[in-house]
Image (cartoon, helix red, strand yellow):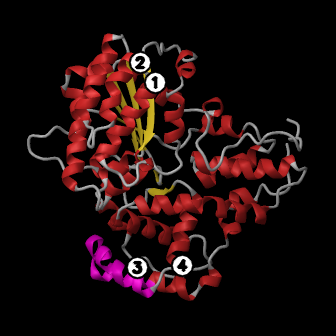
Amino acid sequence: MPEPTSTAKNPFTVGRPVSSDRFIGRASEIATALDQIISRGHLALWGGPGVGKTSLLNLLSQPHQWQVRGYDPTGAVFIQLSCLGISPFRASEFWREILQQLHDLVDPQIQATIAPKLMEAHPGKEDLRSVLRLLGRKKQYLVLMIDDYDAALQTSPHYSAAEMATLVSDCRNLCSHSVERAYLSMVITSLRRLNELGPKLQPGSSPWYNHYLFLPLKPFSDSDVMALMAGLPITPALRDGIREMSDGHPALLQNAGHLLYRELRSGNVPDLISFAQDFQTATTHLFEAQWNIANEIEQTLMMLIALMNLQGRLQGKVYDMGDLPVVFSQKERELLNLVDQGVLVQRGRSGELNFAFASSMLEWWVVEELENSSETWLTERQRIFLNLMSHRQAQIVTTAIHWLWQNKDELPSIIEWLAKVSSAFPKGLIP
């Protein structure tokens, strides 16, 4: 493959969702989503930051993308909104935004019905229900795509727990318990499973899975990684290295590809140190976001795995982790949840040491988080440690973290950490 010219457009997308014409992979997820929509079912997509949830919603909202996959978009009215875009979030503004977008898309007869509803102080599900009936009479149905549904499941001074519970109930009612459900398909996205985010299930109430098909968006498969990186004239060794440091995470791959393509387009052979530093700067926010959505137990398990694996990267036995691996066998549920999120991978059968970080860059970030922590932070973490392990085991972890603070110079640099990528720079970069 020839090197990119200086006028060639960078094919990698960073800082924004991927446009539908550049969308790669997710064939199974797209087919599942379209099957749900045309049968008036409902879908809950979930996955970590940067995994491509918004990009997938963008694609699903394009009638042409339906047609090229053999699906008929006739009668579908598409609305896409983000709950994060409603600030401060209020249930009435959620319904108002839906009605406003519908007003801009439907014929004058339905517009005349919607217009007075937009003037109400607190529009709600009944207002949308009446519009759905009108759509049904015209052989149409609403495809309602709600991004960042997490924001609707968090209380604030402007949005009480009772209001949140009512909104969730109203959405469920429209989806499952009303006649108008025949004219509605809802696709929502969130960072975690809805049952981990929303109101606790009350006696007599229906669980989430009775209303939505849960579909996790996981890292790219090897074939999807190959398809995305096909625009880079680099060796298979470097592609493997990028795959290892990102574990197929779409946003990480897009950032790596963007940086490499930028240099190649200028006629430069990318420099490893610059690449590592630029990549770190461009992706730190993704690791911070992944860390912040993890609960305290998940964060602690990530720290323990990072501490144990770090020993293998250092010369000699620097600290003793004792019998801490037994903790993993007692927290298999939480570890498997991290696997579902794409944070960890499971190697072989379940057990004490069969979990590892999916991305070497995320593992490096967790070590950095430990290295830059403080005594105050460590004291606050003791309570969490003691929920997972004995006092003696908690002391072992504390000792290991103290060792990190005192021996920062001995920790591997980011270049050493990315050994697989490093071995492909700069020799043999271009095939």
Which is more N-terminal, label 2 or label 3?
2
SS at mark 2? Answer: helix
The amino acid on which the numbered mark 1 sits, given as a three-letter code, is: Leu
Asked whether, in this view, residue 379 is left or right of residue 314, the answer is left
Q: What element carries label 4?
A: helix
Mark 3 in CB contact with mark 4 (< 8 angstroms): no
**Which image quarter is the N terminus in?**
top right
The residues bearing labels 4 and 2 have C-alpha atoms spaced at a distance of 62 Å
- Label 3 vs label 2: CA separation? 67 Å
Q: Which amino acid does label 3 sit on?
A: Val
Q: Which of marks 3 and 1 is nearer the N terminus?
A: 1
Viewer-proximal residue among 280 and 142:
142
Q: Name the residue under label 4.
A: 371
Residue 284 spot, x, y in % from top left:
59, 63
Q: Residue at x 73, y 39 (%)?
A: 11
* C-alpha separation, residue under disc 3 versus residue under disc 4: 13 Å
Residue with the mark numbered 2:
108
Which circle, 3 or 2, is nearer the viewer? Answer: 2
- Seen in the picture, residue 430 relative to 411 is either above or below; the reply is above
Q: Residue placed farthest to the left in the image?
A: 204
Point out which mark residue 397 bears: 3
Q: In which quarter of the image is residue 39?
A: top left
Type of amino acid at the residue the image marks with label 2: Pro
Give me the disc on residue 105: 1
> Tag 2 or tag 4, which sits nearer the N-term?
2
In magenta, the rendered stretch is 375-399
Quick one: label 3, few (<14), some, or many (20+) residues within 10 Å?
A: many
* Cα gap from disc 4 to disc 1, whole angstroms: 53 Å
